[in-house]
Amino acid sequence: MQTQTGSLLHQDHMATIESLQNLEEFLGRQRGAPVLDETVKAFLAALGGTLRQEVEKHFGFEENHLFPEFTRRGETGIVMMLTMEHRTILPLALRVADLADAAVAAGAFGEQDWRDFKDAGVELVEREIFHIQKEEMGLLAAISALVDGDTDVRLAQVYRETVG
Ligand SMILES: [Fe+2]
Ligand SMILES: [Fe+2]
């Protein structure tokens, strides 16, 4: 049985995986710093927005509203593991988003910035897809098992207000 909170998180996860796969394909196509035509600019601008949304709002909801429900019920192991992964992914995602925004603003990637974007991007894709897969396999089922109906409705409401 899927909870409201679980299905909201799931929709977000699928959108994020799609952005990460687009990033992976984009990186795989380039042989050196790309020319920033309108298509590439639009892609980079959208990528920056999605990544910030994910690691600031989605992670924030999980850590501030969802994980405390687990901790209260004694499920600290899964909370510690997922929180530690957030701590690794968040700075990587912000680095990629900052470099994408800077390139759009400047109209080009500097050589070193491009290398940094590529390195951080490859690592981000790998770590965040793995993180989302873990949440899809373990977290959503744990929400169904642990969170009662009233709490689910309240969490889903908080999610809509804080994540969108
Ligand atoms: Fe997460
Ligand atoms: Fe998540």
Image: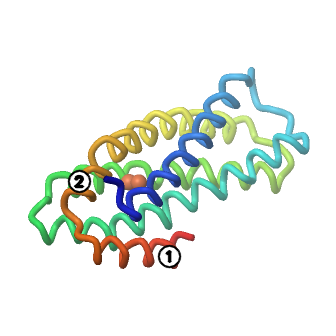
- Residue 130 vs 105, above or below: the answer is above
Q: Using the image as rendered, state which of residue 136 and residue 54 is in the foreground.
A: 136
Q: Quadrant of residue 66?
A: bottom left
Q: How many marks?
A: 2
Residue that mark 1 sits on:
162
Residue depicted at 26% across the width and 57% down the height: 144
Amino acid under disc 1: Thr
Residue that mark 2 sits on:
142
If you read the primary sequence from the N terminus, does the residue marked by circle 2 or circle 1 appear first? Answer: 2
**Label 2 beta carbon within 8 A of ligand 2:** no
Where residue 84 sits in the image (x, y, percent)?
A: 28, 52
Q: Using the image as rendered, state which of residue 73 and residue 146 is in the foreground.
A: 146
Q: Using the image as rendered, state which of residue 157 and residue 134 is in the foreground.
A: 157
Where residue 73 sits in the image (x, y, percent)?
A: 12, 67
Q: CA distance from mark 2 to mark 1?
A: 22 Å
Residue depicted at 66% across the width and 58% down the height: 49
Amino acid under disc 2: Ala
